[in-house]
Amino acid sequence: MKPPKRAQRRLKLLVLRIGQPVGRCVVRLLARGVRPAPPGGARPRVSFLLLNAYGVGGTIRTTFNTAAWLAKTHDVEVISVVRRRDDPALPFPEGVDLSAVDDLRATPGLLGRFARALPSALIHPEDYGFRACSFLTDVRLARRLRALPPGVLVSTRPGLNVAVPSLAPAGVTLVGQEHMNFLAHRPGLFARITSTYPKLDALAVLTDGDLEDYTRLLSGAKTKVRRIPNALPPSDAPAAALDRKVVIAAGRLRRQKGFDLLIRAYAEVARTHPDWKLHIYGAGEEKAALQGLIEGSVLEDTVTLMGTTRTLCDELAKGSIFVLSSRYEGFGMVILEAMSQGLPVVTFDCPRGPGDIVSDGEDGIVVPNGDIDGLARAIVELIEDEDKRRRYGAAAPAKAHRYDIANIGPQWDALLGEL
């Protein structure tokens, strides 16, 4: 008789927690012989470490945007931990170098295949990037980071933030970025954060709430904690005309994003306004479940999973309302992208970010977190009140442009100047 799935998961997690410290020691031994590169040219060097620079998502978009800004005064590279495709899915900035640590398109030799079959020892198992990596990824990442020349390394997710302090050589300044909020980390990962973040030279967070929480957590450490919001990527897409009967949502198809809540809410919207459609952009592990929910709710003619898009702003411009239904967020970058195209926003007041961006009654409607009926009523309110929809949409771009790179970039300049 097999143990219940929950017990199996707990057992697997226990094995990983016991084996990971040993694995990290082995990785460091295998990388020990790599010598750091000598200093480069006259300009300071900044390296951004992304899990997958070849994918799509808010973290990737805003990292590319920040890299492009810093490339004006620094030598900048983006290091992708894994690579699955030939070219980045999003436009890559000019003047920035791109490299990959573990190219998953290539088949390694016998030892490499064995190492790829083993779980990662560097990435914490409670980080959502864990399953994308392997022990082979660890070894290659450790050797790549050990070879960094003096400069600044900016890691962009908790699993990487806790891994880099033991890998980067002397002379490399470590900056962690938090794209998820303080309250959302699972217990084991949070314990690693507590023990490892004090080894970072700086931590950049996105919201005032995270600034307060991480400042308190790191009060006795050398780590500088700064709030630097995500910068709005540039777009030449036209503003939304708000004359199409289309509601838009976008994000990775995972439980965090709450698209199951949105679909349940939209069943009520469709009952009174069947001519309005809901388009959900994104890909992810919940796709089959969400499609089943759509079909089970008899919404096949109303709700469509659109897949991923390289031109999200163009698609946003085709809508009239944007909805964010997340259970929690790190910031809510996609809200800014929607507002920049002149879309009024309906959002849950989830922790953290959306309630800081959207002004209820001015450029959108903020609904109590998880209130499915309230979400449906807010969408219907903007469908039925065209004047309000257009008024909120007209106010949205001014809010979004507070987050232009011209305003956010100098905050990065200031932090790097301090370091």
Image (spheres, helix red, strand yellow):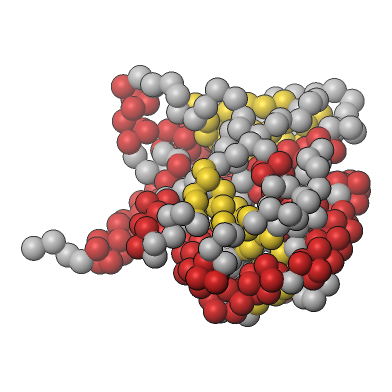
Residue 41 visible? The answer is: yes
Residue 392 visible? The answer is: no
Q: Nearer the viewer, residue 344 or 224?
A: 344
Q: Nearer the viewer, residue 273 or 285?
A: 273
User: Is 20 left, or right, of 93 in this rendering?
Assistant: left
Q: Is residue 213 above or below residue 341?
A: below
Q: Residue at x 52, y 30 (%)?
A: 83
| Residue at the outermost left position | 1
- Image quarter of the N terminus: bottom left
Q: Residue at x 85, y 23 (%)?
A: 41
Q: Nearer the viewer, residue 231 or 99?
A: 231
User: Is 406 left, or right, of 203 in this rendering?
Assistant: right
Q: Is residue 289 above or below residue 75?
A: below
Measured as percent of width and height from the top left, residue 328 is found at 59, 67
Q: Residue at x 74, y 71 (%)?
A: 385
The image quadrant that residue 229 belongs to is bottom right
Q: Nearer the viewer, residue 405 or 227?
A: 405
Measured as percent of width and height from the top left, residue 390 is found at 81, 63
Measured as percent of width and height from the top left, residue 199 is found at 67, 55
The image quadrant that residue 311 belongs to is top right
Measured as percent of width and height from the top left, residue 384 is found at 69, 71
Q: Residue at x 75, y 63 (%)?
A: 344
The image quadrant that residue 150 belongs to is top right
Number of disc labels:
0
